[in-house]
Amino acid sequence: MTAHRFTDRTALVTGAGSGIGRAVALALAAEGARVAVAGRRAEPLAETAARIEEAGGKALAVPADVSRAADVQAVVDAAVGHFGSLDIAVNNAGVFRGGTALADLSDDDWRVQLDTNVTGVFHALRAEIRQMRTQPGGGAIVNIASTFGLHKRSAGAAAYAAGKAAVSVLTRGAALDHIADGVRINAVSPGATATAMSLRPGETEAGRAARMRTELPLGRASAVAEVAAAVLYLASDAAASVVGTDLVVDGGQTA
């Protein structure tokens, strides 16, 4: 595997069993990072780790639920114990339970989305920052927010949008709190991306592609690799002066 921007650095990616999280983990490994991957389901995580290792990289799979603080701390401890440091973290784990108007939303659907999408990011940030600020080189953190939130709203997605808006604000606050500690924090807000989450109930990938041709100025959903490229830029030394930004990757939808 060719080493590039992240040689000899350790990265942690949550929600790495599929979609954007997996794409980010693979991209980081392809550029030299040792990658710890976390998520609730062991089997998809193992597949992500196996893909990294088959390509010549180094990976560690650690099942974890980010809504539980102890799980997140255990992931950080495992990454540092196995690889020696934590230099990059990408907080991608999230859930979407949409399609229901706010007045009809169940307590469980509200709680699950906020517990994972907001409290989970808080748990991750806290554990990652506490480690990174002890290191001479600090670290870089990228949170995955969404265009649903500060940038866009949609009927049937109020709880999800509220959570992702909170991620954008939490990113900025944490960035200001900890840049003096050498920890640089930013966010990426993807729009419609070619993952299972962007499929409507019963919709095929071909159906989504037809819908995107009229819904998005770009005419298509973003590829997971394109979102990963934005994440890697923010995690890299090229973005050394980028602090507390929220980078939108959405094919022009919120332009």
Image: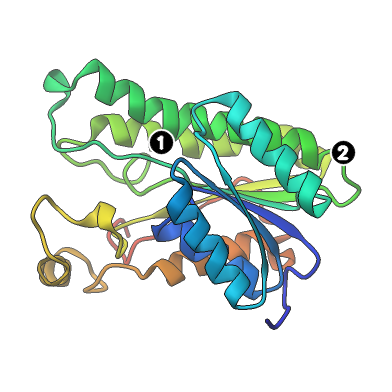
Q: Is mark 1 on a helix, strand or loop?
A: helix
Q: In which quarter of the image is the C terminus?
A: bottom left
Name the side, left or right, on which 182 lies relative to 60. right
Residue denoted by label 2: 134
Q: In which quarter of the image is the N terminus?
A: bottom right
Residue at the image position 51 percent from the left and 62 percent from the top: 48
Give the percent coordinates (x, y) of residue 134.
87, 38
Residue at the image position 48 percent from the left and 62 percent from the top: 47
Q: Nearer the viewer, residue 243 or 198?
A: 198
Name the side, left or right, on which 247 lies relative to 238. left
Residue placed furthest toward the right: 136
- Alpha carbon separation for disc pair 1 and 2: 29 Å
Give the percent coordinates (x, y) of residue 201.
11, 50
Asked where in the image residue 125 lies, by quadrant, the reply is top right
User: Is 12 rendered above or below residue 115?
Assistant: below
**Three-letter amino acid code of the residue under disc 1:** Ala
Residue placed furthest toward the bottom: 2
Asked where in the image residue 114 lies, by quadrant, the reply is top left
Residue placed furthest toward the top: 107
**Residue 44 in view, yes or no:** yes
Q: Which of 63 and 161 is in front in this view?
A: 63
Q: How is the image coloured?
A: rainbow
User: Is 134 rendered above or below residue 194?
Assistant: above
User: Is 151 rendered above or below residue 156?
Assistant: below
Residue at the image position 38 percent from the left and 32 percent from the top: 163
**Three-letter amino acid code of the residue under disc 2:** Thr
- Mark 1 vs mark 2: in front: 2
Give the percent coordinates (x, y) of residue 36.
64, 53
Q: What element carries label 2?
A: loop
Residue denoted by label 1: 165
Mark 1–mark 2 CB contact (< 8 Å): no
Q: Which of marks 1 and 2 is nearer the N terminus?
A: 2
